[in-house]
Image: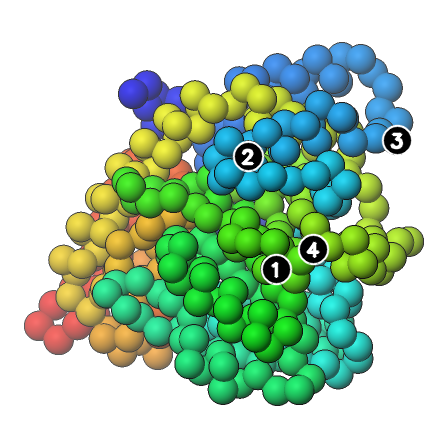
Amino acid sequence: MNSDRFDQPIDRHTTFSQKWEKYRDTDILPMWVADTDFMAPPAVIEALQSRVDHGIFGYTNTPAELNQLIIERMESQYNWTVQTEWLVWLPGLVCGLNLACRSVGVSQDAVATAKPVYPPFMSAPRLSDRKLISIPMIEQEQRWLIDFEALEQSITDTTTLLLFCNPHNPGGTVYTREELEQLSEICLRHELTVCSDEIHCDLILEPGLLHTPLASLNNEIAAKSITLMAPSKTFNIAGLGCSFAIIPDAALRKQFQQVRKGIVPDVNLLGYTATLAAYKEGGSWHQQQLDYLKGNRDYLVNEINQIPGLKLNQVEATYLAWIDVSAAKLENPAHFFEQAGVGMSPGRDFGDDRFMRLNFGCTRSMVVEAVDRIRRAMLSHLPGG
């Protein structure tokens, strides 16, 4: 594998990067927000340069070729037949979560989600005048899963929507087909609509595992589903704002589109340009990135589990490590690790303050340095260290 492109540090300090600006002028490694430090695929950069050279940046329709690429992608990767009219393009995935909450049910209905989870899953219901029902996740054979029994018990007459995350952020779980079928059966029996965030579907790290879109299981769950996907995490183009929803049911899709009117803008032309190039020509780069991320993952899991007070399960997908720091008995874990020179996302933001989330979508040398800093801090903190 040609890993040079991923091993090469790129200075982001002059680009107003959210990730790097947070710890500007400090010796803290930014390993928090979920974007990578890898240069986008050459095909994406070339397509953007060509589009910029054209010099006119007016309102832009969705390229028909891009719609066709998505349809072909769903068919080839998931054996899922998708229609063009099911696609709703969005300038970001988070707005899709919020639109889903506003599109299903009525004011003060309940929206269920499982914690720990990506923070907008918990804020979107409240921002949409809905009640949030939090379901615990359970650790089973080093994987994070929804507690299906707790989900069933939490559903009331006013529960209309489940926000679901697969692959799971921050736990990295890739749900099996059997697990998805169990979830589907519960949702159909209780007449729940499901908004499934599948933004990390192209970042499966564990050999032998495959992503299965929930809506691809059968027509019944498809009719109750809003599936959210995007190229942003896969190809590191989040700043270009391009995502899409797949909504097979015409009535649900109409409501979703009605709610967005006048509030959510269309995708910008450079977002479309980058997405088209990424899906069309980014396959080789994507595979190289997966190989590199697997190496980072393997190093991290091995090293973190040798540090007293810390535990890290195998990360099946994403480039995010969900590190259990509970045994370290830290009063303020985020501050402790920042003092050690590593800036991670606090677990409390995801609904569980016993954990920290570390982004390993960066150079191997940065991962090694982060581990060294964490190890030194933990050995100093623990008795006898």
Instruction: Where is residue 32? Give x, y as percent.
Output: 46, 53
Instruction: Where is residue 151? Give x, y as percent.
Output: 49, 79
- Depth check: give the residue in front, 168 or 339: 168
Label 3 vs 1, first from the N-terminus: 3
Image position of 205 (left or right of 52): left
User: Is the residue under label 1 in contact with that under label 3 (CB below 8 Å)?
Assistant: no
For this orientation, the residue located farthest to the right is 262
Question: Which residue lies under the disc numbered 3?
Answer: 59
Amino acid type of the residue tagged 4 in the rendering: Gly
Q: Disc 2 to disc 4, how far (Cα)?
A: 23 Å
Q: Disc 2 to disc 3, how far (Cα)?
A: 30 Å
Question: Which residue lies under the disc numbered 4?
Answer: 96
User: Is the residue under label 4 in contact with that under label 2 (CB below 8 Å)?
Assistant: no
Q: Disc 4 to disc 3, how far (Cα)?
A: 21 Å
Residue at image x 61%, y 59%? 220
Residue at image x 79%, y 77%? 106
Question: Which residue lies under the disc numbered 2?
Answer: 75
Task: Say which quadrant the C terminus sits in.
Answer: bottom left
Where disc 2 sits, the SS reads helix
Label 2 vs 4, first from the N-terminus: 2
The residue mark sitting in front, 2 or 4, is: 2
Question: Which residue lies under the disc numbered 1?
Answer: 220
